[in-house]
Amino acid sequence: MSVAEQSIAGAEARGHGFLASSVGRKVIMAATGIVLFGFVTVHMIGNTQAYLGAEGFNGYAKFLHTMLHGAGIWIFRAVLISAAGLHVWAATTLTMDNLAARPVGYRAQQNVASTWASRTMRWSGVILAAFIVYHLLHLTTGTVHPNFDHTNPYANFVSGFKVPAVAGFYIVAQLCLGLHMWHGVWSFSQSLGLSHPRYDGLRRGFAYGLTFLVVGVNITYPIAVLTGFIH
Amino acid sequence: MAKHFNLTLHVWRQKNAKCDGKFVEYPAENISPDMSFLEMLDVVNEGLIRKGEEPIAFDHDCREGICGTCGMVVNGRPHGPKERTTTCQLHMRSFKDGDNITLEPWRAEAFPVLKDLMVDRGAFDRIIAAGGFISAPTGSPQDANALPIPKENADLAMDAAACIGCAACVAACPNASAMLFVSAKISQLALLPQGQPERYLRVRDMIAQMDAEEFGTCTNHGECETACPKGIKMENIARMNRDFIKASLTYRPATIGGGAG
């Protein structure tokens, strides 16, 4: 039975704050989601330089490490880690609330409007979180990379993807990213209150377009290495 | 006259809020396709009463689709398979001979099952009491044209006001979120001049009460919109979120000397 039974929360509950409220955490979820989707889009565009060869790619890596006298990359990292942390925190607490909101489920439940992507957000999210940790250990710190060379990101990228299991995991992670973006990119506009018949149709189109673009291009990298197109 | 047919019902039976419940199978025989779904249950209940068994308890009142009292999950869909239809307006012609029908109550922590298919929707009343009203001085009515209202806003407010509070949105939502209901009740006032003075206080109060009632949160599945017998749109949830963001950004704590001059 609910805690609030027979009581009006009123003024005290009103003070329970933005971050404690359901809608407030949805807004945090959406705002950090925009940062993270923005990042994967820029990351995808930057990595297209892998097709320019070792010089172009390593030059891009050097630019990232030296911009704003080396402070730039740390500013980016700080923003991304904060966004990811808040995103995971909001997702975890909201998911717990949602599970608690229906302790007894239905014997027969028909899903009519929801999509497979929307129903698997928490799973695609968990896989993505695990992938991000692996990806950082693999190509940023080199901890799990067998022949990592701090001075040659291009060689790390090529030798890393030459291992079929690694390339396979990257592709699976990209498909999860696709599922997450398919629902998430549309969903954040709704959570932030951006809805109007004049552009509601565009929200879906934008989500699907961005998903195909980011995931489509990202998947070409491991495939290009495996097939020897990038070597 | 259309041919009568037979069905098998699998009904959630629960003696009271404290007992555990279970599914019980009942035959529904000689059902006319012209009966409403509730009339079919009435027929089954008469049979149960004649046999000396406890009839199936379900909520119902107007039986013309406007009061929002009736409601049960029919084969996994709130109010059954037909869109924009309450359970009382669902007719047996939507089913065919030999069908199995599973009947369950709305499932949400905020809606304790009282008996069988009846749930306590008092949480909705408390959300309304927390702010779903306007404080207007009463007196003689104003001239109709004293408060100009754009036609579009009047229409959107009317669409939101079509909500009958049946809670099918909560029942359909995989997260048992009440946001479609709450946003409709916020929107119907937020779109009209009479709702403006308390607009941003209302959104905070109603959301606070919604959270206190332990409803889930919206993940934009869209199941609510499909299940709603009155066609309430998810656009209302976006409006509620928008108002909540604005309210959170501009809220001033009450001061003791406020307005003293």
Image: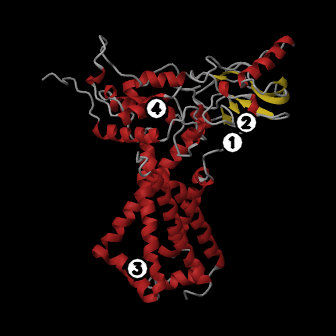
Name the residue that disc number 3 marks: A61
Q: Residue furthest front?
A: B1
Tell me the mark number nearer the camera, choosing from 2 and 4.
4
Name the residue that disc number 4 marks: B160
Which corner quadrant of the image does residue A160 belong to? Answer: bottom right
Whole-Å distance between the Cαs marked 4 and 3?
53 Å
**Residue A119, percent across and down?**
61, 50
Q: Circle 1 marks a residue in which chain?
A: A
Name the residue that disc number 2 marks: B75
Number of numbered discs on residues: 4
Q: Circle 2 marks a residue in which chain?
A: B
Whole-Å distance between the Cαs marked 3 and 1?
49 Å
Which secondary structure lies at badge 1? loop
Amino acid type for the residue under numbered disc 2: Asn
| Dot placed on the residue nearer the N-terminal end, 3 or 1 | 3
Whole-Å distance between the Cαs marked 3 and 2?
57 Å
Tell me the mark number nearer the camera, choosing from 3 and 2.
2
